[in-house]
Amino acid sequence: MINKVLIANRGEIALRIIRTCHEMGIHTVAVHSTADSDSLHVRFADEAVCIGPPASRDSYLRPDRLIAAAEVTGADAIHPGYGFVAENAEFAAICEDHGLVFIGPTAETIRLMGDKSLAKDTMRAAGVPVVPGSDGVIESALEARAICDEIGYPVMVKARAGGGGRGMRIVRSAEQLESNFNAARNEAEAAFGDGGVYVEKFVSQPRHIEIQLLGDGQGRVKHFGERECSIQRRHQKLVEESPSPVVDADLRARMGEAAVRGAMAVNYRGAGTIEFLLDADGNFYFMEMNTRIQVEHPVTEEVADCDLVQFQLLVAMGERLSDTPIQMDGHAIECRINAENPFRNFSPSPGRVTAFHPPGGHGVRVDTHAYAGYVIPPHYDSMIAKLIVRARTRDLAIKKMLRALDEFVIEGVSTTIPFHQQLLVDPRFVAGDFDTTFLESFELKP
Ligand code: MV4
């Protein structure tokens, strides 16, 4: 049994986790930096512990301080949320060593999926489609040359320690290979202290489609359909939806089955996501596995009518998954509201929120830690709210989102609301005709 959970996070996700814990009768401990003393997660939790100064590396990223806070408050589990220590295998192992339940997969699984090359090898061995390329990491440009001549250009050189778009290079021809290969290796060594790279065929203009998974670590894994996440800017998602406008029941079944097969191969425990690239011909390929609850999990919760954080807690307590299939219904869209100025290259806009009026009504959900008078600190990411709507069809969901965006009042800081208002009336977005390169050519009107 878990009686008390320490939430090793801040912002909206800390609130999100506290809410589910309290519904389940589980006590909560918030941790916070000195910059977050007035945050809602501190007020909503049963107890709070200050773990350091504003910089994340001195507070939210410090395993020793998180473990000490859990020990002094008598917490028996730690929920990492997303970001910070959520995919830190060493932290998960430290929790286990201290008799604390890490709410997530085993340290072993986190480590395996954190190595993008090993993750790919694992998925290939499990029969999950992967992009053609090298078998594991490559030691020399000469070795890369032989593989690339076989698979054909363009290719991508990816860092084993990368992920989320970090440490990647496109190589368009054999002449560019040696210089790009060496540059990628040096960059990876400098950025991650790990120069291991691998190569694969470049998939042009793919969609990013991910499958939500839940495993019980006892041999059962379920999927909750897909999320369409192609609306991204510099590897930051801005809008997510479920279902994808291009995924039909057959493709969903095949992608879901592949993702479940991959997760079963590692006897996955907890909530996780398998990201796929979907090409223009309808072929899908494993890209990465995220071993955490993700920012965009609410769109799945809305269409599957479930609480994924509750599922995380239940499987962490050893509960088995039932084999009743997940029923999905309707359409959900999430817009990330960031304190950024979309007219100034999305530059951060921290500071005091002088007025805050979130939208409401049927099918509207706002996950936020902001309030009138809240001061957005400059030290953390700029997301201040997630606006999620749910309706019977995609068209109705878009209309509802536009109505909700129109109602949303946030004063004192710039936000991405005007960006969303223009995106959601773009004919290509409305038609579902977009891929991961869409925002490169999207022009925001002044
Ligand atoms: C790719 C790719 C095309 N071909 N791999 C970006 C994030 C990282 N997880 C992998 N990424 C990509 N890998 C091959 N073989 C294109 C991307 C990519 C991308 C993927 C998903 C969402 C947005 C993207 C933006 C640029 C590149």
Image (cartoon, helix red, strand yellow):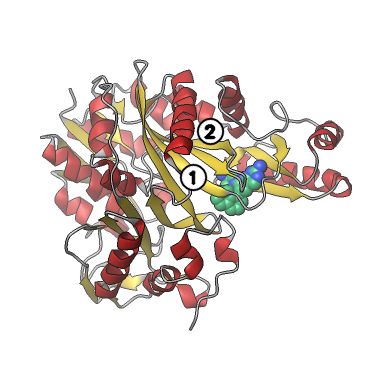
Residue beneath the point at 28% across and 44% down: 329
Q: Is residue 31 visible?
A: no
Q: Which mark is residue 114?
A: 2
Tell which tag, 2 or 1, sits nearer the viewer: 1
Q: Is residue 134 left or right of residue 31?
A: right
Residue beneath the point at 46% across and 73% down: 342
Nearer-the-camera pick, 35 or 228:
228
Under mark 1, the amino acid is Ile
Distance from Cα at disc 2 to Cα at disc 1: 19 Å
Q: Position of residue 360 (x, y in %)?
A: 18, 64
Nearer-the-camera pick, 325 or 2:
325
Q: Is residue 152 visible?
A: yes
Residue contact at pointers 2 and 1, CB within 8 angstroms: no
Q: Position of residue 100 (x, y in %)?
A: 28, 25
Q: Quadrant of the N terminus?
A: top left
Q: Which mark is residue 209?
A: 1
Nearer-the-camera pick, 329 or 276:
329
Who comes first in sequence, dot 2 or dot 1?
A: 2
Residue beneath the point at 78% across and 43% down: 181
Under mark 2, the amino acid is Gly
Q: Which mark is residue 94?
A: none
Residue sticking out furthest to the right: 175
